[in-house]
Image: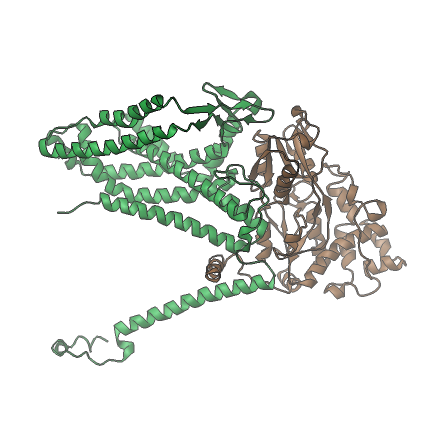
Chain colours: A brown, B green
Amino acid sequence: MKKTVLALGAAVALAVIAAPASAQTLKTVKDRGVVNCGVGTGLAGFSIPDNQGTWTGIDVDVCRAVAAAIFDDPKKIKFVSLSAKDRFTALQAGEVDLLSRTTTWTLSRDTSLGFNFGVVNYYDGQGFMVRKKLGIKSSKELAGATVCTQQGTTTELNLADYFRANNLKYEPVTFATNDETVKAYESGRCDAFTTDASGLYAERLRLANPEDHVVLPDIISKEPLGPAVRHGDDQWFDIVKWAHYAMVTAEELGVTQANLGEMMKSSNPEIKRLVGTEGKYGEAMGLTNDWAARIVKHVGNYGEAFERNVGMASRLKIARGQNALWTKGGLQYAPPIR
Amino acid sequence: MSSVDARPGSAASVEKPRVAFWNDPEKRGYIFQAVLLAAVVYFVYSAADNALANLQKQKIASGFGFWNNTAGFDIGQRLIPYETTSTYGRAFWVGLLNTLLVAGVGIFFATILGFIIGIARLSKNWLVQKLATIYVEAIRNTPLLLQLLFWYNAVLKALPEVRDSLAIPGGLFLNTRGLFVPEPSFGPSFSWVLYALGAGILGYFGFSRWAKARQAATGQIAPLGLAALGLIVVFPVLVYFLAGSPLSFSVPELGRFNIRGGVQVYPEFVALVVGLTIYTAAFIAEAVRAGIQAVSKGQTEAAYALGLRPGPTLDLVVIPQAMRVIIPPLTSNYLNLTKNSSLAVAIGYPDLVQVFTGTVLNQTGQALEVVAITMLVYLTISLSTSLFMNWYNARKALVER
């Protein structure tokens, strides 16, 4: 019975998972000429299109780094804008090669959903935003509150956990997209809006009167956000992981977009291995040996990407905090290139 | 090709003419059916096999084991007890009941509104008729999703915040969180009132049968409306007071964030019901108008000629005939309303699609299973509605003599 129902379901939903899971994503991408990259529906600093339709953000830069490493051209990307609810099906079905959209790395996503997570491009945590006039100082005071959140996120689960652990009552209202959630909060449907703290700061700026709203200081969860790929293609998984590590390594070694030309002539063996003037590390991944130099040339190092998108050079003005290099008290750490 | 069969002499002989089996239309028919069946079976098999193989290759979990796992998320509106620690299966039932609730309430109001508008379109009053026409044309020709968003945002934006709730006399509060009404709590002797109501309804049916038989025999008309009022309304109310008013209300009051106590009618629910009702009513109105116009004018004239007044003419001659035309499109409108309720996902109403193919699918990642279950559920709801309406249609069908 179970089998027949499953078979029926499989046939019915054939369109969902019709594309054969290719173990040769790199070859497919090269033949196609673009990387299909799953990004968000518009979150400032992470993935948002500007007024010319160009996608920017720290998540977008992961896509750009991968495209730069493969094609030496960060524009060879087809961006697929996905809601939190649709993102996993899109990656499972092969609609995107890579999902880089503030996705929290969790055990079940890493296993039973059929994905591989390898790196964290932003360490985040969940918080709450409320109206200033409520006079709330801590999220523990939210007993009885109505909370707006986005459906199909770890946020939705953490919210339930947090109120259960603290034995507080609340009322959830969930929406499929971030925009609808924020709109509902702004219209007064909810007392509080919850998502990752970075998202709270970004969304607060988009509200009609940012000054009327305050982000509570409590962080209620760990949200390691990173890119995800499908199970079954180790080469592609390696490329995505190392695209991020190349950016972190470049920051560690002080290689920037501006000084890359000089660094190509450097005699420091670590820098030589990074920019590809020594060793054949790129070829081991099916890329060219200047793969990392291409990433730095087009996207910059991790610190540059951070400052440009979410840091002090952006409107969000988020401090490096946990996202600083390990040498500066943060958590960003890259394994050695050798 | 027809030379063998059409020979005039063959009719005389009993044995069939001997033809090659591929020229025998009957056998050829079977062969084509078998080939088609085999092709369909093969297509379904290979599709299922391909999907299963891909799932296994990517090591994606499959099967229905997730059903009894802990859900870990909350749902706002729930008709049955549901906790964060409940299972995905429980979440499914919460979503399904919310879908059935909104579909049931929507069908109820859409039918009433649809009949009113449909009759208004045929009104002799110029203004009423034009207004009904504008309503039908405007509503039928704009997308439902847009209308739902309009109602949701219109409903929300127009309402005051919790702290400035509109207090409606009778202990009701209205704000952006919805409508708060006093929660009834029933005393133990309230069951007597229900028994009285049941007895009243049964009594009314008995009386109306008797009245019909008497009318057929003697032509006397019994006061049915008065009997209905007495048996279904006055009698239970009398019993209610005799039993000592066994009904009390817990009145909602303003808390720190929200209103405490009472029953909360969520704005998402209101917006969805209003949107679906207004949209579907426009289609029902057209079916009603078509049904009434399908009854030839001669029927009305004949009734008048027999001396029937306009009221009974409509009741006894026009509407019974119009119903035969109205019921089939009415059925498909009911089905549409039920299926359209899945647009709830756009305005955050936790229906089956929002809860199950939204959150549950996303948390478990088992798209095939979840989507298949949801489709089966909608299929079951739709087929049940169809069966009921077909039965009703058969009852109303013209009995030919």
How many discs mark residues in the rendered view? 0
Q: Which of the 4 quarters of the picture holds residue A209?
A: top right
Give the vertical position of A100 relative to B237 (above or below): below
Locate residue B333 relative to residue B52 in the image: left or right.
left
In this view of the protein, which residue sits in the foreground, A330 or A142? A142
Give the vertical position of B372 relative to B118 (above or below): below
Give the vertical position of A232 relative to A226 (above or below): below
Residue drawn 19% across and 79% down? B17
Tell which residue pokes out farthest to the top in this image.
B169
Q: Position of residue A108 (x, y in %)?
A: 64, 53
Tell which residue pokes out farthest to the right in this image.
A267
Quarter placement of the C terminus of chain A: bottom right
Q: Position of residue A305 (x, y in %)?
A: 75, 46
Whether residue A20 appears in this view of the structure is no
Residue drawn 61% across and 40% down? A160
Residue drawn 60% across and 38% down? A149
Whether residue A150 appears in this view of the structure is yes
Q: Position of residue A107 (x, y in %)?
A: 66, 53
Quarter placement of the N terminus of chain A: bottom left
Q: Position of residue A186 (x, y in %)?
A: 60, 31
Locate residue A165 relative to residue B180 in the image: left or right.
right
Locate residue A313 relative to residue A27 in the image: left or right.
right
In this view of the protein, which residue sits in the foreground, A101 or A167? A167
